[in-house]
Amino acid sequence: MEKFNPGKFDPVQWLDMIQENGMEYLVFTAKHHDGFCMWDTKETSYNIMNTPYRKDIVGMLAEECHKRDFPLELYYSCVDWHHKAYPNLGRHHEIVTDPSCHDMEEYMDFLKRQIRELCSNYGKIHGIWWDMNVPEYVDASVHELIHSLQPSAVINNRGYAQGDYSTPERNCFSNGFLPFANLTEACDSVGMNAWSYRKDEDYFSVRKLEKQIALYTALGGNFLLNAGPDEMGLFPEKARDILHRIGVWYGKVGKALVSPPCPGLVKNASFLCTGKGKKLYLVFLDPPAGETVNLEGFAILPEKAVLLNTGKEVTATLEPMAYTLHGEKRLRLRDLPADEMNEEINVMELSFSEDVIIPQMTLSAANESGIEKDL
């Protein structure tokens, strides 16, 4: 703390980068596990105002976000290595501190006062992003406090009550590619080792991150992508490059990823389907095996089929497959530039002359209608 002086931190540059890359909200770490606070808190001297920098970074970010009407959420770690009352017992994400000082009620009183500061002193806050409630302590009054001060704020599911949405982390997807039943925000970092700045970091490939973003968003979720600024407040060049490349890609295909999921519309596990009305999008999670893709179970000819990544129009035909016994017709997308589709996650837009996508029905409604499968 005695040396911390991020003199090159510039909230204008941060927000420029964020918006230029197509991101839609910001989650900033107000307090991580070490207990250090990035705002002018009156509850502990372990904060940014007692460093050589002496500026309220949360306040500076909030001011710039408000100027742009850009949503800001604040991350707050339930674990605290610095506060003597927090019961650090050496569990995951904890250190070991003097047990004679541990007092969960005292710590929760401290926490609530800090949350009151964050929700009272910085204008509208879009949400509170909890992390690491290691003791699994339950106290619904914390969320009630947040909503009393910030009625529209969203709260994730890692805090002291159920929360508004779930937060799966890293590669943890295993539900058979079904749309999320509940509000979900997945997350990962551009760095393979850390969620903050790390010297000599190893970075994930852009394509790997694109695949995660495409997978989670095409199934109805959000995706939170982390990058850690260095001690001067600057993002490493490699991280900036990754964010830029993902931003360019997302700018081309994003409209497909935010469209409603269409599970079961086609019988092909090579891609996910989204769409609405006259538009159907095919999200290729992996490059096609060849220059033609067959949509088994789907036999409506589109007016146009376009690869959003490049704008290339491909040939669409409706004809029986050579190996079908009963002349079953299916949509075939032909002349795909298969060898050129390895660099990024590809999305195909199919445009029809009439509505081809029926709005999703809940399982209970479908069962009551005598319909056994998703529409």
Image (cartoon, rainbow, N blue to C red):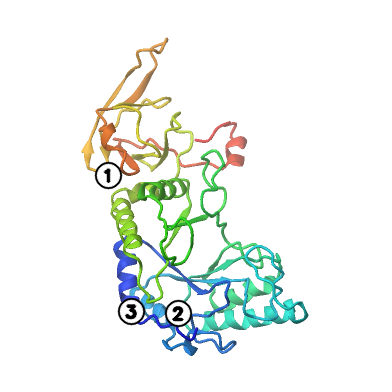
Residue at disc 1, secondary structure? loop
Expressed as whole percent of the image width and height from the top left, the position of residue 215 reads 45, 45
Question: Distance from label 1 to label 2 (Cα)?
Answer: 37 Å
Question: Distance from label 2 to label 3 (Cα)?
Answer: 15 Å
Foreground: 257 or 223? Answer: 223
Give the residue type that dot 3 points to. Answer: Lys
Foreground: 331 or 359? Answer: 331
* 168 relative position to 261: left or right: right
**Circles 2, 3 touching at the beta carbon (< 8 Å):** no
Q: Nearer the viewer, mark 3 or mark 1?
A: 3
Residue at disc 3, secondary structure? loop
Where 240 falls versus 173 (above or below)?
below
Which residue is denoted by mark 1 in the rendering?
309
Where 314 falls versus 22 (above or below)?
above
Give the residue type that dot 2 points to. Answer: Val
| Residue 289 visible to the viewer | yes
**Circles 3, 1 touching at the beta carbon (< 8 Å):** no
Question: Distance from label 3 to label 1 (Cα)?
Answer: 36 Å
Residue at disc 2, secondary structure? helix
Q: Which mark sits nearer the N-terminus, 1 or 2?
A: 2
Residue appearing at x 33%, y 79% in the figure: 8
Expressed as whole percent of the image width and height from the top left, the position of residue 152 reads 51, 70
How crowded pointer 2 is (Cα within 10 Å; few <14, some 14-19, many 20+) is rated as many
Expressed as whole percent of the image width and height from the top left, the position of residue 289 reads 35, 28
Q: For residue 337, what is the image quadrant? A: top left
